[in-house]
Image (tube, rainbow, N blue to C red):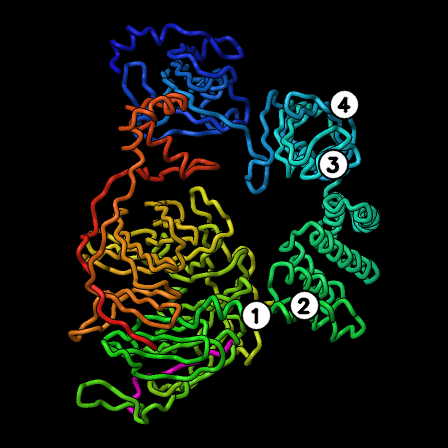
Amino acid sequence: MTAEEMKADGAPLEGVDITPKRDEGVLKVIKREGSRTESPMIGDKVTVHYTGWLLDGTKFDSSLDRRDKFSFDLGKGEVIKAWDIAVATMKAGEICRITCKPEYAYGSAGSPPKIPPNATLIFEIELFEFKGEDLTDDEDGGIIRRIRKKGEGYSKPNEGALVEIQFEGRYGDRMFDRRELQFEIGEGDNYDLPHGLEKAIQKMEKLEESVFYLKPNYGFGSAGKEKFHIPPDAELQYEVKLKSFEKAKESWEMNTEEKLEQSCIVKERGTQYFKEGKYKQATLQYKKIVSWLEHESGLSDEDDTKAKSLRLAAHLNLAMCHLKLKEYSQALENCNKALELDSSNEKGLFRRGEAHLAVNDFELARNDFQKVIQFYPSNKAAKVQLVTCQQKIREQHEKEKKMYANMFQRLADKDFKLNELVVGDTNGKLYVYKNDDSKPWTVRSCQGMLTCVGVGDVCNKGKNLVVAVSAEGWFHLFDLSSPALKHPDASGHHELVAAGEEQKPVFKQHIPANTKVMLISDIDGDGKCELVVGYTDRVVRAFRWEDFSESSDHISGQLLLLKKWLLEGQVDSLSVNPGPDGSPEMMVSQPGCGYAILLCTWDSEQQPTPEGRDNSAPGREAPVRDVVLHQTSGRIHNKNVSTHLIGSIGRGCSKVNSGSGLFALCTLDGTLKLMEGADKLLWSVQVDHQLFALEKLDVTGNGHEEVIACAWDGQTYIIDHNRTVARFQADENVSAFCAGLYACKGGSNSPCLVYVSFNQKIYIYWDVQLERMESTNLLKILESDPEFGDLLKQLGVERGDVSSVKDLIHKTLYLPEKQQRNSPSQCQDHAGIDSSTYHTIIHCPL
């Protein structure tokens, strides 16, 4: 926009004064009327496009040029004053131009280098949408606030505060409650107030007037409210004015005597709530005791004993409330706190066992019930629960045997020459295959049902060893490169000295049982490998080898436990990926296409792990802050769906490897994603197969590793960095899959796909024909098909406006809750994998 055009437009001279003071500090001209009647309120999240000019026509900023809409919280001082004033007057779909005097813009300081001091600015703003402020801790949209009138000051009511409110409650178009009320926060249930409204009031300032929208979980829930004729699972609306409040005393405002006295009072109140079945109200009372007394110090012996007794009772009662509410992780936390105060407490052990049992952690539940019986032999309930646990464990083992279908495999190099295929089964047998021979090169015996196998320099001796771990917790080491174990025959193959004789491991140690997945890698950046094991009870443990011998050939030492982490969901895969600074990050898959980063910091001194004992529990367990949970963007239909991940995906030499590494995730319901770091989604693909395995492999030989995902029916998807998809169909349904380099023929490693069928046959494929699969381009469909034109118009988008259509698609598919910035459009068309790379060659029955 030139200076002449701006003067012709009259923008600097015309417009309606919209400032509260009417000082002409912000003048507004509407260029296009909005499509709705409602304007945003204070605290609303608003989304706009804008362009800004100086008075001489110089453009200094534009979100349109960046093709990136801008969002901010209205009335919170996140933008210049003129914007907070102007956007509050707009309606969705409106375009306006505002002229801002310096005192409503950047003032005498300006914003160098583009905006000089004391500059009058012109903005053209388009308002796309606005939504209320989410007040829930989990940002689940359960409590939405829209502020009609801002309150006074910054103080807000706390738990136990005495508040005076004036309110109306509405269900649909019907007003069901209208009162002026004085009550204590935490006692709202006694006055027929939903707990979500109490939570909302704690976010208000004095004399604030707001509208709150409550989802059923924060309203009257599945029970409804018969008194007000509110049906189950009803969404409610409350208009509230906070007339006044008196805050309850905080912990630091009370002396020890007051804390002990008040703790006894709220304990009795909590017990009464519990008897009435008001478990949420009861938890609020017991939590007060913990907050008041948990960090109290310098007490007399008498007061210390009393405080400890109150804290113990509070944690035990909280655990019971959380069990009733089916909040099992919180119940476990309170049980652990109680057992820190009294390690053999009968109720603490029993209730922790109940919580473990409720989340199917049967081994841990059994341990707790066994301790109850050990300390309290007459506890009949514990004996009944112990029998239940033992039955569940047996059922789980049978289920896992079927699920694992007798096969675990890994392509790896055990001698730093050509890769072998290492296969383990649930009968404790370890098979190693070489070249194109359908018979095992060697067979080894292990103790227990093998759940994971691997090859790596786990002892940090510069030598690859085969590692096999059983469900019962037996860790086995095999050295297949020892010349004493084999001799070359005339064909160049190696055979066992004693034909058919099964060799024993060179080392065996017992670690905690219920193993599931395993990783051998340097996870802390010190140049040495660690052994990381994932367990069926949502636990991950890291071990390091302590060597007793200086010889590189002799294996003598033991595994030391470095750390234990407890995850929120089941662990299905482990991987390492470069972090933003290039150092390794330990990644663990989590359900619902999520993952966790485990912080790998160790204690200065490590104690040996006695056989069969976990020396990390309870004191060595990693704190919650050492597990950083990430949920990737996008719509996940099942938040509990099984998820696999793989990191450190090779980019090739054509691009400088800087910043975070590439990693991929897949889910059992067919979602595949490629990520760069925690926040950047490169692409997402949805297929109509159940994906149970995820690998990486440079299929084309161009230095870029492709993502390879396999489904139970053998359908295999190979996707490059540009989202070009090729697929391959194995000959049978499969129970296990891996991909990598294998020495099939010709004395060199080649890219291979390896499958194990449910009838216990191994199939190795290389040099096979791949079928190129064209992915559907939604953008092109919307542009070309006339029937979508009217639909797009109803959504406020013109079919020819490619940028707006892309934004709509991206928001619909990938931004269900809140906008993710810097996410690339998913509507690009790319070229990539050559479709002629692969041919079936070997079929190996066990």
**Quadrant in which residue 845 is drawn:** bottom left
| Start-end of magenta stretch | 473-484
**Residue 808, percent from left and from top:** 38, 30
Question: If the image is split into quadrants, where does the N terminus sit?
Answer: top left
Name the residue carrying label 4. 179
Cα separation between marks 1 and 2: 27 Å
Figure label count: 4
Q: What element carries label 4?
A: strand
Check residue 479 for magenta coloring: yes
Residue assigned mark 1: 616
**Farthest residue, direction bottom:** 498
Q: Which amino acid does label 1 sit on?
A: Ser
Q: Quadrant of the C terminus?
A: bottom left
Q: Nearer the viewer, mark 1 or mark 2?
A: 2
- Residue type (three-letter) at the residue carrying disc 2: Thr
Camera-near label (3 vs 4) is 4
Q: Residue furthest left?
A: 746
* Mark 2–mark 4 CB contact (< 8 Å): no
Q: Considering only order in the chain, which callout, 4 or 2, is on the residue closer to the N terminus?
A: 4
Please tell me which of labels 3 and 4 falls first in the chain: 4
Is residue 581 placed above or below 743 in the rendered structure? above
Q: Mark 1 Cα within 10 Å, few/some/many (few <14, many 20+)?
A: some
Question: Gap between marks 1 and 4, in whole Å?
Answer: 55 Å
- Would you name the residue on which mark 2 appears? 388
Q: Callout 3 environment at 10 Å: few (<14), some (14 to 19), or many (20+)?
A: many
Query: Label 4 amino acid?
Result: Arg
Mark 2 vs mark 3, CA separation in Å = 42 Å
Establish if 37 lies above or below 454.
above
Mark carried by residue 185: 3
